[in-house]
Structures are given as structure tokens and as C-alpha cells.
Amino acid sequence: MPRKICVMTLADEYKQQLAWRSWKMAYDALPSLQGATVLDLGRGVGDQAAEFVARGARVIGVDINDELLDAARSRNLPNAIFQRADLRTPLDIDTIVDGIWCGFTAAYFPDLPIALTRWDRHVRPGGWIALTEIDNLFEHEPVSDRTAELLEAYVQDALTAGRYDFRMGRKLRGFMEQADFSVVNSLTLPDVEFSSYGPADPGVLDAWEKRFECMMLLRDFCGREFERVRREFLHCLACDEHRSKASVQCCIAVR
Ligand SMILES: C[S@@+](CC[C@H](N)C(=O)[O-])C[C@H]1O[C@@H](n2cnc3c(N)ncnc32)[C@H](O)[C@@H]1O
């Protein structure tokens, strides 16, 4: 079967997803942003940077993806700069910031304590770091044992290969403590897309369809079973009995 092309840009997808999050809960739990400088790691399209600026902060946003950086820059936010960088390597930033924000990006760093130690060099003594990550993206019921087994094997493969930790949400606190941070607040953020019960909102279903179209590694991993897994997962999300075991975890820590 020919592979579908992802027609919606990544930037459009991120913009659509904003309404499903509960970012305000996390923002409200942060130390005051008035006059603060925030380093925003894995910036995406700049939605959170816009909120930080609105709350009086100056933002340095970093991302590896040029399309997303262009989308962020096109907002012309005052007091915000966006630069391309690979977070797997030391950052070329000479500003010492008051806090680090990292939304849905920690999972790309299965060895998170090592990355945290690298990123922490940019935070002033007494500064803060706030990480938000999904836990158990694929854990939705009811699906067949075979589909659950395949998705679990994919999750383990991503972890073993050091690509992505699909259970990073639950590990944030432990990893932050391992990197010598003191966790001051842990929150579970309600999320319409990831942690809902019952039939998913049509927009959420559409987003999951697009996500599956773009998940080439999952497609290759599942091989001939991919179409069945995709259909079954989407049916699970749409059915009355749908239950999500996924959650969005936010952890705020200081040095
Ligand atoms: C799931 S998105 C989250 C975007 C945004 N923070 C949000 O919450 O909507 C993950 C982001 O991390 C970025 N990213 C992933 N690996 C990266 C790396 N090694 N260096 C820099 N950015 C990276 C991606 O380009 C993407 O913008």
C-alpha cells in the first residue's frame, strides 16, 4: 500500500493541539515570570513562549526543527528569540536564565539526568526547571492482546535504542532528583487528547489519524500488521468503552 503524505504541517498540528492541553495549571505553578528570563527547550511553534512573554518574561527558545522555528519566529513576539540547536549537545548560549521550561521534549532524552546536568549550566543558582511529559502515550483500552503486545514491543524498542521514552512522565521526579534538583511541585495536567475517557473528540481522532500517518518507525516496526493496529487503535479511541491510561505529568524543581 502506498504511504500517505502528511498533508498538515507539523506547525499546524501543534497549533491545533493547544486547546486540548491544561498549560495554565503548569504556568500558574511556576515561580513569577515577571522580569524573568526563560530558556524554552524543544520550543515547537512558540505557544508557550507567547504565554511567558505575556506574563512578563523574556524567552530564549531552542529547537532543532527549522519549520517549527520559522513558525515561532513568524509570531514576532517581543522579548523572544528563537534559535536552532540540538539539545543532545552543549548549547551555545551565554545567558544565565532564571528558569528552564521543557514541554513534551524530555522523552527524547531517555538518559534524562545527563541532559539535565548539561542544561542546568544555563540556570542561575536558585533558579528553576519545569518539565512536562506524557506517560504511556499508547496505553488506551480496549485493544486486542496482540495490538497491546506490539505497541509495548515498540515502546521497549524506542527505549532500548535511546530514541524515546514513552513512559517518561512517571520518571520525571526520579530523574530530576538523580540530577540533584529538589522537586517542589508535581502535577497531573488534564488533557483532552491523551487522558480522556469515552469516545474521543472528533478533532482528537483526526489528530491521531495524522499521527499514525506520520509514524514511519511504528509502521516499519509493525510491518504487515500496521494497518490493523492503526484501525484498531482508532476504533478504541472512538468507542464508548474507551479508557486512557495515559497522563500528562509536570514536575517543577529548583537547585
Ligand atoms: C512534541 S514537541 C513539543 C513542542 C512544544 N514544547 C509543545 O509542548 O508543544 C517536541 C519538540 O522537541 C524538539 N526536539 C526533539 N529533539 C530535539 C533535539 N535533539 N534538539 C532540539 N529540539 C528537539 C522537536 O523539534 C519538537 O519541537
Image (tube, rainbow, N blue to C red):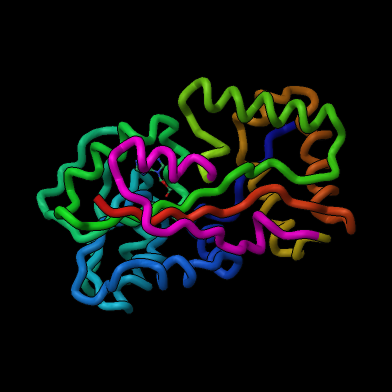
Name the residue at 65% across, 54% down: 194
Q: Position of residue 68 (x, y in %)?
A: 40, 54
* The N terminus - image quarter: top right
Name the residue at 60% across, 29% down: 217
Residue range of the region highlighted in magenta in the rendering? 170-197
Q: Is residue 144 left or right of residue 188?
A: right
Q: Is residue 87 left or right of residue 122?
A: right
Residue 245 versus residue 147: which sits nearer the camera?
245
Name the residue at 25% across, 43% down: 119
Name the residue at 52% across, 53% down: 249
Taking the magenta stretch, the answer to whether it contains residue 187 is yes
> Farthest left residue?
94
Q: Position of residue 205 (x, y in %)?
A: 74, 57
Q: Position of residue 164 (x, y in %)?
A: 50, 33
User: In which quarter of the view is residue 79 placed?
Assistant: bottom left
User: In which quarter of the view is residue 156 placed?
Assistant: top right
> In the figure, 143 relative to 151: above or below?
below
Q: Position of residue 96 (x, y in %)?
A: 13, 54
Q: Is residue 166 left or right of residue 205?
A: left
